[in-house]
Image: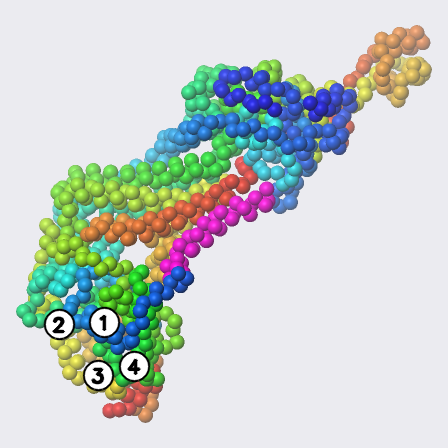
Amino acid sequence: MSTADTQTGIRRTPGLVPVAETMRTTERHPPEEISAPVPPARRTWAFWRLLGSELGLTFRRPRNLALLAVLALVPIVLGIGLWIAAGSGGDDEMSGLIQDVAGNSLMLTFLSFSFLVLLLMPVVVSVVAGDSIAGEAGTGTLRYLLAAPAGRTRLLAVKYLNAVVFAYAATAVVALSALLTGLILFPGGSVTLLSGTTVSMADGLLRILVTVGYVGAGMAALAAVAVALSTFTEVSIGAIAGTMVFIIVCQVLRAIPDLAPIAPYLLPTWFTNFDAVLRSPIDTAALRDGLLAFGAYIMLFGSIAWARFSGKDITS
Amino acid sequence: MRRGTFVRWGVPIAAAAVIGAAIGAGPVIAAVSGDPVLPERSAEQLLADAAAATSKQQGIAPMSGTVQQTASLGLPALPQTGGQTSPLSLLSGSHEVKVWYGGDQKFRVAMPTQLNETNLIVNGDQAWYWDSATNTATKLTIKEGSEQKHTTPVPQPTDLTPPQAAQRMLEGVDEHTSVRVINNAEVAGRPAYQLVLTPKDEGSLVQEVRIALDGETYVPLQVQLFAKGSAEPAYQVGFTQVTFTPPAAENFTFTPPAGAKVEEATLGEEGFGKKAEERAEHAADVAGQVKWVGEGWSRVAVVPFKLSDLQAQAGQGADEANGAAMLDTVLKSATPVSGTWGSGKLIKTKLVTALLTDDGRLLVGAVTPEELTKAAGVK
Amino acid sequence: MTAITLEAGAPFGAAPPSGDAIVTHGLTKRFRGGQIAVDALDLAVPRGSVFGFLGPNGSGKTTTIRMLLGLVAPTAGTYSVLGLSAAHALPLVGALVEGPAFYPYLSGAANLMRFDAADPTAERATAKRRVADALERVGLSAAAGKRYRNYSLGMRQRLAIAAALLGPRELLILDEPTNGLDPQGTREVRTLVKEIAADGTTVFVSSHLLAEIEQMCTHAAIMRTGRLVAQGTIASLSSGRVALVKVETPDVADAARTLGTLGLADVRPGNGAVTAELGGHAPEKINAALVGDGVAVRGLAVVRPSLEDVFVGLTGEGFDVDG
């Protein structure tokens, strides 16, 4: 109580209180802690609530919906193009893959993925993931979220999980759009794999599901890179552009035959490994190696994002 | 707080270290825990075992695995030719095939590439060649009494499997070679013996040849060719993953999928298509004219050869155009040489030296340029 | 310190009002590049006070607030808010930092829900009611469903104050709360602050507007180029400067003599007026003495120094009234 007395004493003292005097008289002992004011169960619920809020923000934002719509459009355009080509062209002029697509409705999904994982899906994912922290910093809402207090590690985790959900949503949108287009335009039935063997349609659908899981994981790894970049800037376009440059540089490096030894270290190298599901038997080693590479990227860039964000001065 | 900065950044640094360790774990674990020491064997014992394992009578145990072939022969950079399945592309870079072997007369070799796959499936007297890129299934009929592999001069994926390569190497073990055995090698995660063949001849470009034999089954798992003065193998073919359990039966059955083009070809009689037939004839012609100079490792092949012939031939067909482009690249990198034997163009790689003399001979050998020009003097 | 009950609706006045709401010791922030924004700040904000944090723009007020909210890490020194660590204190702190910032494509209510979701101690079940209450309090109920993009500057400022009032707060940190508000809005904010303070909540208001601080605050601290120049109650700050008595008269010399004989210090004869320090003298007695001595008194006034005079006296510079 002596401290409080001293305080009131100061307040009663007429005249200016010189700074030096305040120093001497204010309390010096470390602030007392009260034991966990919030029960852990409530904390868990609060985490999901924040994630829900984040997802609502992401999936209600017109820009993000437009991005998903563009992704959905590509398999439709691709399917119609191939449908026209298959209807007019002679058998000899068509490549094996076009024949595969024309021959079975499920193959359009794999063809769409093989195109989209190269650039368009990474772009879409990096827009949302690159915007995650930098976007909030740019609008100034980051300071209010942290003062709420959202907690830095907690907010970063929510932001990353949100990006992962979006990455899987983007993957699922491509798969569904391609699947529907394929089912409308091309005959169903058994699916011919790359190895020349045929499997039932149900088996084919299962393989599409595995592909979605794999490609989504790849996009989640890319999202980790984008979120990490996002913690270094207050301009979201900077983080988005940075991620795109990363993807393009990787693709260029992959195209140089002399640099083949570094290819396994480049993230996009592993995106196309989903074609392992089209082999007989399924090349599980290729999928496993890809998933390990994704895990390594998530671990490295996730920890970089954490190290940066947890110590960053929020001045925006 | 500033001290906290270091602690924080320690986390990603630790993460990078863990990932680096995981990437390097293979060789590191092999080196540290490693040395799975097998019982000692003399070279002769091992060769006998290997010969038994490789020979047709006893047969190789059913197995499956991934074979990786890496060539860094020091060739001039070749233009990208004919896709990844082209035989020429095997001369540089790294390639992977999957192999399933289900006992005698049953095997499947698949070469997976991006969204494509070529397969050779042999089951008894039935053989299929499937190429997903062209959606073509070719039924290969093997002529009665002929062996599966020797008739096609075009390198087939089957020629690259370790057993075949090892067999070729073992045929060359003679008085020109010193042989030793390493009993603590590891290939594809399996303890293996390593047979090291070192040429006694000074003129050879080959430092040594290492053949890894599985410690249990004596199946050759890896063959490495080391050029002189190079720590990395100039050529390597081996399993990166192998299991000695009989593969599933469906690997050896093939039904052309609906909508695929089905072609037929008979091996041994008509050859593998027309072009292959021509090549085979040409190869037979050339083989008849080969003269050998020297013995053992420094043996040099001398072939009558006219550059103009090759260039004329190279002009035909789309497939040959790639050959022509490669030929140009190779010739550009050749050095003109001359001596008492005459003059010509010398092409030197890590492992092979070739000399194209102006008087129309081609000398090829795994020897130093000096040896080659010496051989050029022997008319 | 007794444990604070965090059940929603619990009276926070239950927490002991003893101690200080904000205490800093040698709090210093040096930004990358060497520029010192805050220099060895020792601040003591008593609980229950309305504390004015005064200083020209760029004097380090906002950086101090950012440090208190855990947004910026101090280079040196310590601080404590409500006697707790930042993670435990912040749910009890409502803040308005450097103007409003919201999601333009969300409605006002949706924006408040968003920030409520970010607070791990906030209860989802009561969120709707608390958001409605907060909007009601700042007079934005009618515009709750309107997108933030379409809000006027004043509405945005009010929404930011509503966000600060979302939960039961023990401390309200308001950085320039009347920025962008019209005179009517300014008055409303002032009334609101007084109401909140009446509930026992400590309010920490930063401003560069002197009048605002004088009208709202019980205490104040004055910053200048990152340093704390003075702090205390408004009364004590003002009393640092003595009151003057000013006598308007044509008989300047006579008046000065009378004041001298009365014992007033620092008598200064001027042009048509004499000033002197009032000291403990009663102005009516001075007047009687002057009249008794036959001085023609045209006017007599006691001039008490304003906070502005204090500020000018302390810093040697004028106040940036226009911001």
Within-10-Å neighbours for mark 1: few <14, some 14–19, many 20+: many
The residue that label 3 is drawn on is: B303
Answer with mark 1 or mark 4, whichever residue precedes in sequence.
1
Q: Are marks 3 and 2 on the same chain?
A: yes
- Label 3 residue SS: strand
Q: Residues within 10 Å of mark 3 (few under 14, many from 20)?
A: some
Give the vertical position of A160 relative to B202 (above or below): above
> Is B300 situated above or below A234?
below
- Amino acid on which the number 2 mark rests in the picture: Thr
| Amino acid type at image mark 1 | Ala
Distance Cα–Cα, label 2 vs label 1:
25 Å
Q: CA distance from mark 3 to mark 1?
A: 34 Å
Question: Dots 2 and 1: beta carbons under 8 Å?
Answer: no
| Residue B28 painted magenta | yes
Task: Give the quarter of the figure containing the N terminus of chain B.
Answer: top right
Q: CA distance from mark 4 to mark 3?
A: 26 Å
- Let me know if marks 4 and 3 both belong to one chain: yes
Q: Earlier in the sequence, mark 3 or mark 2?
A: 2
- Element type where label 1 sits in the image: helix
Q: Which mark is residue B177?
A: 4
**Residue corresponding to mark 1:** B50
Query: Do marks 2 and 1 both belong to one polypeptide chain?
Result: yes
